[in-house]
Each structure stands twice: as structure tokens, then as C-alpha cells.
Amino acid sequence: MRVTFPRLPDCQRAYALVERDDGVRYRLYGGTTWPRLPHDIRHLIAERELGITDGVWAGIAAGVVLASMQHVSGRRPPHAAEASQQLIKKFAGPGLRAQLLADLVESVAALDRPTASQIRRLARTKLAPEADVDPAAIGAAATAMQVEAARWARLRIGEELCYDWPR
């Protein structure tokens, strides 16, 4: 699956163009555009870097069609809506955990040279008091997110970032 994020003028309705491997294309609407890295890119980077195979982006690649998605082109498989509903149930719990992990990675990315103890402390706050994470993996994902944020900041209006899922 290929996901393309165009840089739009600030205060516009953000979207990503999702081109699934089955040839179906959707526009996935997000929040409002701002200079900072869009929410959906942050989640894609966190899930990709942490190797999350049952999160939001894996669900979309598998056939989940969210309410915020609009069909653009390509022939949808037979019974796509029913299959999507089943997949949404399957990915619901893991998808929530992926969202929480992405939030953790984003918080770590905002720190200047985070230590392993800072990452563990944030994980206990953002995930659960007993959360056990690999600080090195979270730190590496945070670094990747910082790199993508810098790439996004350099884009001019009309330019875009493209990602393959999975890599």
C-alpha cells in the first residue's frame, strides 16, 4: 500500500491518498492542516518503526474502510463493506494500543535527548502503570518521527510525502 500526504495551505482539511495493493484508492480525511507533522503521518511512522502489524495502518491495508475515508477509484472487492466491519472488530483493540504507542513516540520525539528512564516513565503514564517498553525501540521511532517532521517542515505547498506500507 502506498500513502501520499500532500502539503496543503494551513487551516485546510487535511487528507492522505491511500492506494491499496488491490488497486482501490481512498482519500483518508484527517484534521486541519498546520505546519507541524500531520497526525496520520505520526501514526504511520510510529507503527512502521515499531513493527506494529495490527494497528490502524495494517487494518487499512487489510481492507478496513474508516468513516473518514472516501472512495476515489478502483473496483472494490465484493462485500467490501461487510469485510471492513469484520476487520474493524478484529483491529479495534490492537488499533487502540497502536494509537497509544504512537502518542508515546510523539511525546518522546518532543524531548531533547530522552533517557531510557524518561521513556519508561512516559510509557507508564501514557500506556499503563505496569507498561514495559523497549526504550531503544521507542527512542529510534521518535528519532524517525523527528526526521519526518523535518522533511514535512521543508515541503512547499503542493509537494508531498509518500510512504509504502509496509516498507
Image: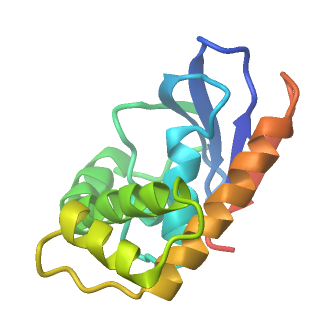
Q: Residue 64, image x and y in percent?
A: 38, 53
Lateral position of residue 21 relative to residue 155, left or right? left
Considering the image in quadrants, where does the N terminus appear? Answer: bottom right
Front residue (pair 113, 100): 113
Tell me which residue sits at (42%, 60%) in the image. 102
In the displayed structure, would residue 134 be above or below residue 153? below
Front residue (pair 142, 54): 142
Tell me which residue sits at (46%, 66%) in the image. 58
Q: Is residue 43 visible?
A: yes
Considering the image in quadrants, where does the C terminus appear? Answer: bottom right
Q: Quadrant of residue 152?
A: top right
Lateral position of residue 141 relative to residue 77, left or right? right
Tell me which residue sits at (57%, 71%) in the image. 141
Q: Quadrant of residue 95?
A: bottom left
Q: Is residue 59 visible?
A: no
In the displayed structure, would residue 69 be above or below residue 98? above
Tell me which residue sits at (72%, 44%) in the image. 4
Lateral position of residue 82 relative to residue 119, left or right? left
Q: Residue 14, image x and y in percent?
A: 58, 25
Q: Residue 121, image x and y in percent?
A: 27, 72
